[in-house]
Image (cartoon, rainbow, N blue to C red):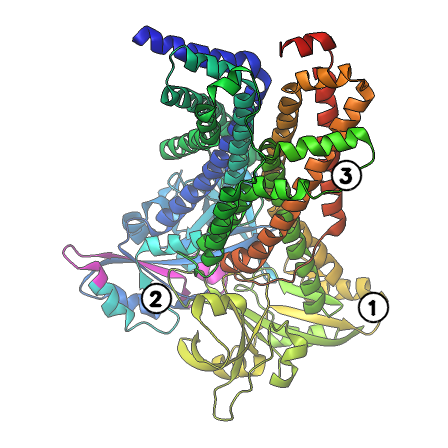
Amino acid sequence: MGGAAVSDLRAVLAGALVQNRMRTLVAVLAIAVGVALGLAVQLVNQAAVDELARGVRTLSGEADLSIRGGRGGFDERLYGIVARDPEVALASPVVELDVRVRGRDDTLRVVGIDAFRASIVQPGLVGEGGDRLDVLRNDRVFLSNAAHNALGLRVGDRLVLHAGDRDIELTIAGTLPGAGRESLAVVDIAAAQDAFRWHGRVSRIELRLRPGVATDAFAQRVRARLPAGVTIDRPETTLRAAESISRSYRVNLNILALVALFTGGLLVFTTQALAVVRRRAQFALLRTLGMTRHRLVALCALEGTLIGAAGSVLGVAAAYAIAYVALRVSGADLGSGFFRGVEASVRVDVVGIVVFFMLGVLAAALGSFVPAREAGRATLALALRGDDEERTSTPVRSLIGGIATVAAGALFLALPPIAGLPIGGYAAIASLLAGVLLAMPWLAAFVLRRLPRPASAPAELALLQLGGSSRQVSTSLASIVASVSLMVSMAIMVGSFRQSLDDWLVRVLPADLYVRVASPELAPLTPDEQRAVAGVPGVARVEFTRETAILLDAARPRVVVLARPLAERDAPSRLALVAAPVARPDDAPPAVWVNEAMLDLYGFTPGRVVALPLAGRNERFFVAGVWRDYGRPQGAVVLDRDTYVALTGDRDVTNAAVWLRAPDDAAAVRASLERVMHGDDRVEIASPGEIRTLALSAFDRTFAVTYALELAAVLIGLVGLSSAFGALVLARRREFGVLRHLGMTRGDVARMLACEGSVTALLGVAAGTLVGSAMSLVLVHVVNRQSFHWGMELHVPWAVLGALGAGVVVLATATAVAGGRQAMSGEVIRAVREDW
């Protein structure tokens, strides 16, 4: 029995390799590309998250709990209160600031610590150098290895940090061996408070509790005594908040990589389906010689599984190479800017390898399941003659299954975000595509049999051939529809996003120049400096804004607060409101306007009264409207600056919008502003055009990986299209031979094949465009809204879609003609004799 089983296996697989070498190789490579892209994205993301986790563990060390507040820190007197708590074993205060390095555009994270306490709670922050007392000196700094590499500095060099209108010079005294790969600088906490004018403020307090103290109960007791906007939680909560900023972006990349894998599975499907058609007579002979139906189905399915296994092995190996290059070229954030300052490296991820290996095998196995079942169902008598068993009846069952699948996808749209992710949107897109692919046999037959018959004989024969083999046509259409729908949906979504972003920037940047303080929490503009800015020659009007960040939820990033001159009656014209504002009742508290993220994440609906922590107190506000904001997906609130000053007493500002008397004087005014601001290192000055250029460049950089993943999936689909047409044409050599005997020339056959290829491609492009348009609506209005909490207007790039569709049609036509030439390359009598 064992020998017979081996013979059966050899008979089936040997035939597949001999007759389908190139198509099998292409299918293996398609699965490999899908696995490689998916695993590479996972490896890069995991490397970034791992380093982020190490950074949090370095800052928190062995602390049980962490107290933290808004970006501006909180009163250090809280440290004395919690440190004296009898259940606290040790409290370690921390000052954490992003400081600009002199002569560089980027910032460096500077951490101030009490070395005595940090050596117990956060030993990774205690530097090592030649003199152990350097950790206490005001002019010494310790850098992590990542910071040394990024800045190009060594121990003993001078590091110059820019804090507003002054420079802070520090000597690099040593390194931070326990700081991981995050770019970090550590100084004494008193030195940090003095140098950066943070007197009386700290950023966080790390707590080590006494043995036996219940952590959650202690946190709940202390939380009730903390000032508004200050929270206490476990250190891992900080990690979840940092991770949440980039999670949607990372998940979307993984989904796109899986789309490439799905397209590879479709390529396996077309390869196996056409291979089964071509080997119908061989399978019938094997069954006549004693092979059972189930044995044949299992062996055909094994072909696809082996293709998946081979592709997965290649994909896993390629994934590590891609991840290594991606980390070197675009960094741990893949161009998105979420993980700046993190120097990550690829590590072995056993779970990721196993998951994506199995996904590759599963995609190929599922792609080969239907063809394997078709091989077992063939009628022996017809199959031995090599006749096509396809019937002319329309496959109504496939239509019913397709409609049911699409209907199920529509139900998924009603699902809210699950764990903050648009799972329902992803499921709806998958159901829509799967449903249309299931219904393609019926759709192809329905359309092809209703096309008008042309006068040309080759064209008429082409339509008759397509109408009589709708199942094989639908097999070829699968890769076209999948590829085109992906191209169309992503082109519309990305185009809509980019155009909406551009339109939004035009609306929110009405001034001639914009000034932004490089380190908002270190050196804001004082009232005297504001008057100096307003008095610069050539300045007609200045609008100042105070930007800060408050903490509403420890498990989420800080919310941005923008205090700017804004009367309620001017809100519709000054803000990009998504709906008409709500009138504030006379007895209601002051008005605020929230962005869409606040609506989704915190439920700040218009008309509601909410509490915001300002200056250590919870202040009540009336939500007057919701505005569109593409810059702050973590949430943002706008309120009138006079209201903000009255509640907080803070008259400093961080941003300025400048209107000029004469726009041609922009260069002179910019130079004057830099002098008033004590040099260009303190502030960033840009025109609206420069800001738009930078924003759109960042957009393109963020979506560069998206483009690459989309291109890979599209190329796989187009290769599948080429493979399907080539296999179909080669399988019809006898038909071509008969047509040649009946008087058709090679040119007639070529024209017939060109007509078949163009009609099939046009049908696939039309279906793919419709499906892709529907998918783009889900991407724009569901996936992006639930992922990033912003809406956008729909913009269809007609020129791009037209060019893509034309390219697919040209490729299909060229492939069909090239395959016909190969099939007709032998003698006509030899092709006809195969049917004797």
**10 Å crowding of disc 1: few (<14), some (14-19), many (20+):** few
Q: Residue at x 72, y 20 (%)?
A: 820
* Magenta-drawn segment: 191-216
Three-letter code for the amino acid on which mark 2 is drawn: Thr
Q: Is residue 780 above or below residue 350?
A: below
Q: Which of 393/416 is in front?
A: 393
Q: Disc 1 on helix, strand or loop?
A: helix
- Determine which quarter of the picture holds residue 628: bottom right
Which of the labelled discs sits on residue 453, or is there none?
A: 3
Q: Is residue 742 above or below residue 579?
A: above
**10 Å crowding of disc 3: few (<14), some (14-19), many (20+):** some
Say whether residue 707 is visible. Answer: no
Q: Earlier in the sequence, mark 1 or mark 2?
A: 2
Q: Earlier in the sequence, mark 1 or mark 3?
A: 3
- Determine which quarter of the picture holds residue 826: top right
The residue identified by callout 2 is 231
| Front: mark 1 or 3 | 3
| Front: mark 3 or 2 | 3
Q: CA distance from mark 3 to mark 2?
A: 75 Å
Q: Is residue 707 above or below residue 321?
A: below
- Magenta-colored stretch includes residue 193: yes
Q: Residue at x 72, y 34 (%)?
A: 463
Q: CA distance from mark 1 to mark 2?
A: 47 Å
Pinpoint residue 497: horizontal percent, then vertical percent.
64, 56
The residue identified by callout 1 is 663
Pinpoint residue 25: horizontal percent, then vertical percent.
56, 20
Pinpoint residue 583: horizontal percent, then vertical percent.
56, 86
